[in-house]
Image (cartoon, helix red, strand yellow):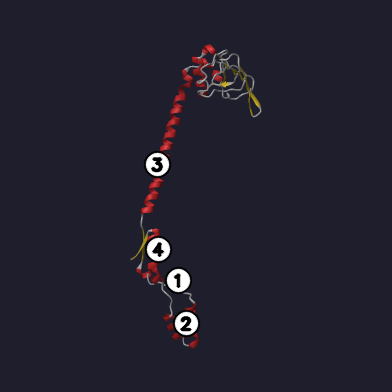
Amino acid sequence: MSYVGGLQLASTTVLLSTSLQVNCSTLNLTELPPLPLDTTELHVQDNRLTSVSPGHFDRLVGLKKVSLSGNPFHCDCRIQYLRNWLLKNRAIVLTEPTCASPSSVAQRAISELNDDLFSSCVQASCINVAYNIVMGVMLCFVIVLLLWSLIIARKSTFTLYIDERHSGFEADSLRSRKPKHRKRLHAVVSEDSTDLDSLICAENLERPLLNMELLPQVLDVLHKKHNIKIKAT
């Protein structure tokens, strides 16, 4: 006897050394459980099955009796596998299962469903396959495009042109704030605080390094580490 989550799924009875009976009837099953490969009798009547998964019975080559009646089978594309299997194994089916829905085929034996009912199933399957192929190709294309863009970006050289009229600008943020400079400037102001011209002259003499003196170092770092070239125009 088998259990899943405390629910009794089926009872198995060994009739002979080569026979195995599986009884899953009246258990409110909505899908078939995994079955032993050596099952010879299968009873799943009076459950809530609406379809049978494709290939579920294919490995049960020793089946001698099968009972599927009393289930509310929904006869759409998903029932096609069971219908084809029933057509090949009529001799071992104890009671013919019937369709419960849709209303157009209600109470009709599943094995009696004609091929016209499944004509649209092949087309839908082909559309799904084509859609999956197209989406796969598009995904691969996007990945290749991203990789190509990354490679191009790593190999690219960026050039920044600076107009000559800005080349002589001083960067206040780069001015030296060394104590030596402040002392010299203070000394000049103390000597003659009333002489504005002398103050301006002294400050000009003690002016810190201009940004253009540091520019070659900045350009060198940008070129070596970031592959960015800056040219003056």
Q: Which mark is residue 221?
A: 4
Is disc 1 surrounded by few (<14), some (14 to 19) or many (20+) residues within 10 Å? few
Q: Earlier in the sequence, mark 4 or mark 1?
A: 1
Q: Is residue 122 visible?
A: yes
* Residue receiving disc 2: 184
Q: Earlier in the sequence, mark 2 or mark 3?
A: 3
* Residue receiving disc 3: 141
Q: Is residue 193 visible?
A: no
**What is the x, y in percent for residue 12?**
61, 19
| Disc 2 to disc 1, C-alpha distance | 19 Å
| Disc 4 to disc 1, C-alpha distance | 17 Å
Q: Amino acid at mark 2?
A: Arg
| Disc 2 to disc 3, C-alpha distance | 67 Å
Q: Please indicate whether residue 157 sits to the left or right of residue 111 in the image.
A: left
Looking at the picture, tell me which residue is in the foreground, 137 or 20: 20
Asked if the residue under mark 4 is in contact with the one under mark 3, i.e. CB atoms within 8 Å, the reply is no
Q: Earlier in the sequence, mark 3 or mark 1?
A: 3
**What is the x, y in percent for residue 95?**
58, 13
Q: Amino acid at mark 3?
A: Phe
x 48%, y 17%: residue: 114
| Disc 3 to disc 1, C-alpha distance | 48 Å
Q: Secondary structure at mark 1?
A: helix
Q: Earlier in the sequence, mark 2 or mark 4?
A: 2
Q: Earlier in the sequence, mark 3 or mark 4?
A: 3
Relative height, residue 26 to residue 171 (above, below): above
Is disc 2 surrounded by few (<14), some (14 to 19) or many (20+) residues within 10 Å? some
Q: Secondary structure at mark 2?
A: helix
Q: Which mark is residue 174?
A: 1
Quadrant location of the N terminus?
Answer: top right
